[in-house]
Image (spheres, rainbow, N blue to C red):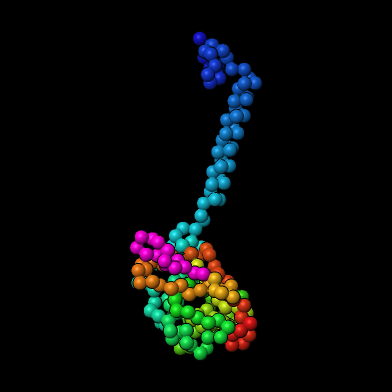
Amino acid sequence: MTDAGVQTAPGAEAGVPLSRREFLNYLWGASMAVFLAGAGGVTLWFALPRFREGEFGGVFTLPIANLPPPDSPPADFPEGRFWLVNIGDITVQDERQPADYPLEPGVKAIYKVCVHLGCLYKWVPTNDRFECPCHGSKYLKSGSRIDGPARRNLDMFFIEVLDAAGNVLSRTEPRLGSQEGSSVVIPPEAVSLRIDTGRRVSGASNSKPGGGI
């Protein structure tokens, strides 16, 4: 039988009091366990994604119905900071498109920040192009730079096209001979787009007036 208030070690025989050294050892071990658990929690916190779906830096899943018709003005998605552009035959054949950056029909998600000094450029319907109000850089609907101090094409975000089962039908791919991403083809069975605003593809170098390198 033990005296009241005297602690015993876990598993120790009843009646054997816990020495001061043993008590400090157990206290140290408990402190280390709490510290390691806390450290593990912090590590797990930083390992988890920091952006939720539907906010900039995360993934946006959009139904195909949200896609603008081919060759129409780009659709603005301010929450994701991108323009959704559907490139059709008229856009492909636009005589303003630099020959060094040939187009293919499909979809692009273009980052809304000017590559010159980071201003927010705007779509100007009367000129059928993007224009930066800060320093005058101008870009076609395709993202190709055609005028101003900017020295490359606009950046774009990575796109995946999904079917009803969530299978990836097509995605942004690097274009042959260019660092830019391709237009993404939309197959008939596509039901949604997955746009990852955490994966940005840099626009190709374009410093020559009217396009070119």
Q: Is residue 113 visible?
A: no
**Residue at the extreme front:** 176
* Residue pictured at 42% horizontal, 63% vertical: 168
Q: Which residues are magenta?
A: 159-173
**Viewer-side residue, 6 vs 84:** 84
Task: Tell me: 147 left or right of 78.
Answer: right
| For residue 137, above or below residue 66 | below
How far across and down, in percent of the image, does residue 9 sit? 55, 19
Q: Residue at x 54, y 47 (%)?
A: 44
What quarter of the picture does the C terminus occupy?
bottom right
Q: Is residue 124 magenta?
A: no
* Residue pictured at 51% horizontal, 56% vertical: 50
* Residue 77 percent coordinates (x, y): 44, 71
Q: Of 36 and 18, which appears nearest the observer? A: 36
Question: Residue visible at 52% across and 88% down?
Answer: 96
> In x, y percent, where is residue 129?
49, 84
Q: How many marks?
A: 0
Instruction: Please identify the residue farthest to the bottom as the structure is shown.
Output: 95
Give residue 71's position: percent from left, percent from top: 42, 82
